[in-house]
Image: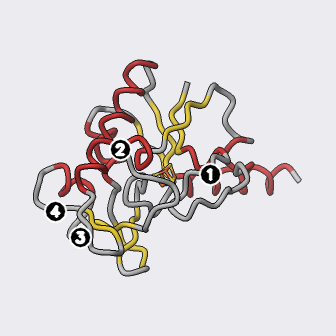
């Protein structure tokens, strides 16, 4: 079993409420049971919701209490982000999951990059950082997509 950001699997949990189609570049390469998690929804935030950003540093700084998360209206949503990260970790532990594929550039799920002021910057989202600290191998959705593209180019 593997944990996967729910929006990659086609669940309409993105901040703007849009329903993405399941990303076949992710689902097509994973040959095991996928458990969808959306840390922002599980933290109690509605869908649709305003986009949020980590104010300083990255998710690790939020976990350490030296940064926070605010939405585009300036409302502090740090508590919700922390709660969602903890729920995602609880689900991972209940399921005995050791790996997770997380959506890149999200303030919750980003593995290598998050977004600040609409720019992609290096850093981890809050949930991805917590899962990694718990010993779960956290893999970027970009990495999976690159592998998929490389594999299919090779076998064409
Ligand atoms: S990136 Fe993560 S928090 Fe954002 S919609 Fe997808 S699963 Fe939810």
Q: Nearer the viewer, residue 53 or 43?
A: 43
Helix, strand or loop under label 3: loop
Residues under numbered marks 3 and 4 in contact, where contact means CB atoms less than 8 Å apart: yes
Residue nearer the viewer, 101 or 152: 101
Mark 3 C-beta to ligand 1 under 8 Å: no
Q: Which mark is residue 155?
A: none
Relative to 43, 4 lies left or right: right
Say which element carries label 2: loop
Q: Which label sits on residue 67?
A: 4
Mark 2 nearby-residue class (10 Å; few <14, some 14–19, many ≥20): many
Q: Position of residue 132 (x, y in %)?
A: 32, 40
- Would you name the residue on which mark 1 appears? 12
Residue at mark 3: 55
Mark 3 / mark 4, whichever is N-terminal? 3
The vertical placement of 48 against 51, above or below, is: above
Q: How would you rate the neighbour count of disc 1 (Cα within 10 Å): few for under 14, some for 14-19, many for 20 or more?
A: some
Distance from the alpha carbon under mark 3 to that under mark 2: 18 Å
Q: CA distance from mark 2 to mark 1?
A: 16 Å
Q: Where on the picture, by quarter, is residue 88?
A: top left
Label 2, on which residue?
A: 43
* Residue at position x 41%, y 27% in the image: 92
In the image, residue 90 above or below residue 19 = above
Q: Is disc 2 in contact with disc 4, using a CB cutoff of under 8 Å?
A: no
For the residues labelled 4 and 1, the Cα–Cα distance comes to 28 Å
Label 4 or label 1, whichever comes before in sequence order: 1
Give the quarter of the figure containing the N terminus: top right
Residue at 65 percent across and 26 percent down: it is 32
Q: Could you tell me if the residues under marks 2 and 1 are in contact, i.e. CB atoms within 8 Å? A: no
Which dot, 2 or 4, sits closer to the camera?
2
**121 left or right, relative to 68:** right
């Amino acid at each position: 079993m593997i944990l996967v950001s729910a929006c990659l699997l086609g669940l309409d949990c993105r901040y703007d409420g849009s329903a993405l189609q399941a990303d076949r570049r992710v689902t097509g390469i994973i040959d095991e049971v996928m458990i969808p998690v959306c840390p922002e929804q599980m933290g109690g935030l509605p869908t649709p919701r305003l986009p949020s950003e980590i104010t300083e540093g990255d998710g690790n700084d939020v976990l350490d209490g030296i940064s926070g998360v605010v939405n585009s209206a300036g409302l502090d949503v740090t508590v919700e982000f922390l709660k969602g990260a903890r729920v995602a970790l609880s689900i991972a532990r209940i399921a005995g999951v050791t790996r997770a594929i997380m959506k890149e550039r999200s303030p919750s799920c980003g593995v290598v990059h998050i977004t600040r002021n609409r720019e992609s910057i290096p850093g981890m989202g809050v949930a991805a950082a917590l899962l990694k600290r718990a010993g779960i191998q956290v893999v970027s959705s970009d990495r999976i997509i690159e592998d998929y593209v490389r594999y299919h180019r090779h076998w064409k």
